[in-house]
Amino acid sequence: MNRPIGLTLSALLLAAGAAHARPSSVVPDNVMPGPLKAVRYDQRLGEQVPLDLPFRDDAGRPVKLGDYLGKRPAVLVLAYYRCPMLCSMVMQAAESALKPLSLDPGKDFEVIVASIDPTDTPERAAMKKRDIVQRYDRPGTEAGWHFLTGPPPSIERLAHAVGFQYVYDKEKDQFAHAAGIVILTPEGKVSRYFFGIEYPPRDLRLGLVEASGNRIGGLVDQVLLYCFHYDPAIGRYSAVTLNLMRAAAALFAIGLALFIVLLRRRETAQPGPLGAA
């Protein structure tokens, strides 16, 4: 694929990821040509991913998807390792969004990258893992990144569970797919979607905190989750005006109460008039 065609295809697939943010959305025929009309994310919030799916990790060891779930939420990326452009953009975007967070892979959450290409090998997975982990550059977190390969049934069942619709182009020996990542709860249920190739770190953090059932993060995260609401139509967290007003009113009331207390303490501390008994 030459660069102009690759860029055009990537733009179309990014459009697919955004346009199919809602399960019932449809990309107009004049936007998505031919088989690319089937490329999209169908949101399946609350769907349970099959935990018994067999894969191989980047060392070639047999594993199951559930081996990486049960304790922590996970960032799930569906891609393939010989993808000429879009997959690397998605994986690098996820790495860039996670990098500023104080949360650590392997401690607070897991990152699971599963190839949709049944011909991908653990060797390719290991090469891609080295590249992404090197970019992430946080020693001690390597065990929290998992790059998997698997047979067609495992790939198809996982893709179906999270609503990831893709098309294999036999003539070009490539996969057409939308761009995005999925947040899973520790139990393996679909919690949040983020579309495109740019994920705001704040949104990704809130998604992980929310998916964990508030078991990670802190007080600031709880306040932000009160003031921001996940909008599945756009795959983003947006401000909740009413909650912001309530929070502002509460802060004003607390500030006013503190001000009154300080004034009373100051009056009590002041000496009485000269000559007073």
Image: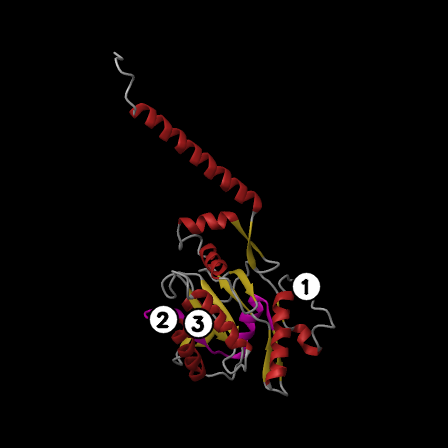
- The kind of residue on which mark 3 rests is Lys
Residue in view at x 37 percent, y 66 percent: 106
Q: How crowded is mark 2: few (under 14 residues within 10 Å), some or many (20 or more)?
A: few
- Location of residue 33 by image quarter: bottom right
SS at mark 2 in the image: helix
In whole angstroms, how far apart are the C-alphas of marks 2 and 3? 16 Å
Name the spot of residue 64 as percent of width and height, x first.
44, 72
Mark 1 vs 3: CB contact within 8 A: no
Q: In which quarter of the image is the C terminus?
A: top left
SS at mark 3 in the image: strand
Residue 210 appears in the rendering: yes
Q: Which of 141 and 159 is in front in this view?
A: 141
The residue carrying mark 2 is: 143
Residue 79 appears in the rendering: no
Q: In the image, is residue 119 part of the stretch drawn in magenta?
A: no
Q: In this view, does 158 lie to the left or right of 26?
A: left
Q: If you read the primary sequence from the N terminus, does the residue marked by circle 2 or circle 3 appear first?
A: 3
The residue carrying mark 1 is: 25
Name the spot of residue 130 as percent of width and height, x first.
40, 78
**Stretch of the chain drawn in magenta:** 137-165
SS at mark 1 in the image: loop
Q: If you read the primary sequence from the N terminus, does the residue marked by circle 1 or circle 3 appear first?
A: 1
Q: How crowded is mark 3: few (under 14 residues within 10 Å), some or many (20 or more)?
A: some
Q: How crowded is mark 1: few (under 14 residues within 10 Å), some or many (20 or more)?
A: some
The residue carrying mark 3 is: 64
- The kind of residue on which mark 2 rests is Ala
Q: In this view, does 78 lie to the left or right of 10?
A: left
Name the spot of residue 68 as percent of width and height, x first.
41, 67
Q: Quadrant of the N terminus?
A: bottom right
